[in-house]
Image (cartoon, rainbow, N blue to C red):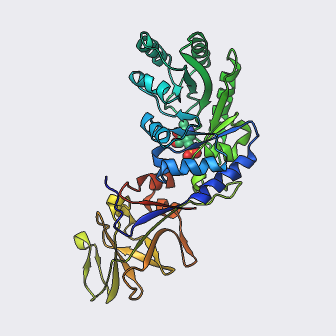
């Protein structure tokens, strides 16, 4: 998708906020606990390379991404710090793990056997850095029992093509007030560790929520994602113990302003009809930018005034009801602060009935990201 640079709609990313969010978490961690910044999915929509650099400035020792290609993007940008992939890699891509020096999850014995078979006549420049993934109750990827984990650990110890670098899990309810299921998962992970012949370099359980609300259980590395972008992982449920500064604003401008008579239909399907004479403004952002049709009825900010989105959101544009005539070119804030008023990504998520993670990731590649420090 082409980036629409010749259009006033843009996401503004506050690089300093990301650095500060990382620094605030770094201060809470033990000195020997590494912070890996999670910059998958284009840095949760904020831009992978730029946010990785901002996180490094705040004390991130490494990065997590979901896919090989996301890792390659960081390497090609000159990032030499450790990179851990979070998703299972096809064994046929194993050579890339060595070429780019990626750490990666081992989630089953079957994968190890396949890898051994595939590697049989291949020589690699360095041992492959394996992190055993334990499924403590997410039901996603990973080993399900302690014995199988211990076997995989021994297998890795016996295979010089591999370095057993880490063991980890991902808790599914660390962001909730009710900790019963979290305790079960935590306990199971401890049992798994106890059954091991020895421990690898990295033991890690912590996403942002675990790091913020269960810091005693993170091991010696955290995988810090959403909180580095200044967003509370729990939504409304729990208060974060440190300030989280939102890094992303979404802005545009009015591209047309018109006075419509009572009874005018607005947008596809005529779902809004002006009940009286009204000023209507058009804003160049739509569902192709990730501003979805469900945003109809929500508000944006113009000169500090909340203005309702009226009529259906189109692919590239939307219409808002203005309290008065504002000049074309006036700033429209969709996320962020405008004249003392603020719309948060959480507000947008609430409107959509989803989580802010999804809002951030849904902002499409067409929206330019502009970085300010
Ligand atoms: C395995 C794993 N670790 C860490 C994270 C980061 O989570 P968060 O953004 O909640 O900090 C994710 C995110 O989805 C993940 O899948």
Up the image or down, 45 lies above or below 4; here it is above
Q: Say left or right for 35 vs 270.
A: right
The x and y percentages for residue 141 are 49, 29
**Quarter of the figure that contains the C terminus:** bottom right
Q: Please, which residue is most extreme toward the front here?
A: 78
Q: Residue furthest left?
A: 269
Most distant residue in the right direction: 30
Counting every numbered tag in the picture gives: 0
Question: Image point 69% across, 49% down: which residue?
Answer: 25
Residue 241 sits in quarter: bottom right
- Would you place residue 69 above or below residue 291 in this image? above
- The residue shown at (41%, 76%) is 308
Front residue of 227 and 310: 227
On screen, residue 204 versus residue 276, left or right, reads: right
| Residue 354 can be seen in this image | no
Relative to 217, 287 lies left or right: left
Please provide percent x and percent y for residue 212. Answer: 68, 47
Apparent side of residue 206 relative to residue 73 in the rendered image (left or right): right
Question: Ligand 1 quadrant?
Answer: top right
Q: Answer yes or no: is residue 71 visible.
A: yes
Tell me which residue sits at (44%, 73%) in the image.
299
Residue 50 vertical placement versus 148 (above, below) = below
Q: Answer above or below: position of 327 versus 159.
A: below
Q: Position of residue 180 (x, y in %)?
A: 66, 39
Q: Nearer the viewer, residue 120 or 131?
A: 120
Residue 125, position as x, y percentages in the image? 51, 20
């Amino acid at each position: 998708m082409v980036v629409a640079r010749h259009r006033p709609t843009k996401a503004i990313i506050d690089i300093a906020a990301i650095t500060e969010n990382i620094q605030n978490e770094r201060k809470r961690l033990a000195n020997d606990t590494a912070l890996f910044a999670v910059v998958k999915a284009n840095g949760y929509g904020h831009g992978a390379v730029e946010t990785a650099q901002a996180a490094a400035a705040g004390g991130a020792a490494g990065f997590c991404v979901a896919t090989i290609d996301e890792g390659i993007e960081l390497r090609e940008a000159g990032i030499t710090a450790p990179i851990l992939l979070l998703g299972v890699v096809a064994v046929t891509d194993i050579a890339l793990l060595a070429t780019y020096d990626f750490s990666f999850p081992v989630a089953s014995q079957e994968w190890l056997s396949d890898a051994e078979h595939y590697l049989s006549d291949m020589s690699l420049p360095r041992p492959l850095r394996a992190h055993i993934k334990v499924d403590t109750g997410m039901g996603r990827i990973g080993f399900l029992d302690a014995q199988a984990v211990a076997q995989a650990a021994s297998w890795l110890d016996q295979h010089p093509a591999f370095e057993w670098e880490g063991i980890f899990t991902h808790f599914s309810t660390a962001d909730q007030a009710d900790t019963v299921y979290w305790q079960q998962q935590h306990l199971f992970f401890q049992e798994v560790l106890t059954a091991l012949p020895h421990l690898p370099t990295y033991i890690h359980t912590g996403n942002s929520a675990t790091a913020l609300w269960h810091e005693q259980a993170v091991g010696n590395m955290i995988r810090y994602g959403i909180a580095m972008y200044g967003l509370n992982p729990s939504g409304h449920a729990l208060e974060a113990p440190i300030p989280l500064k939102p890094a992303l604003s979404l802005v545009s401008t009015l591209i047309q302003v018109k006075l419509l008579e009572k009874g005018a239909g607005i947008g596809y399907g005529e779902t809004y009809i002006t009940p009286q004479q009204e000023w209507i403004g058009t804003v160049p952002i739509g569902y192709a930018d990730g501003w979805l049709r469900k945003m109809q009825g929500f508000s944006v900010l113009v000169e500090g005034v909340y203005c309702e989105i009226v009529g259906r959101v189109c692919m590239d544009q939307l219409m808002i009801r203005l309290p008065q005539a504002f000049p074309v070119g006036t700033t429209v804030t969709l996320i962020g602060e405008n004249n003392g008023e603020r719309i948060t990504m959480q507000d947008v998520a609430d409107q959509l009935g989803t989580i802010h993670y999804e809002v951030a990731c849904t902002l499409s590649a067409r929206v330019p990201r502009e970085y300010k420090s």
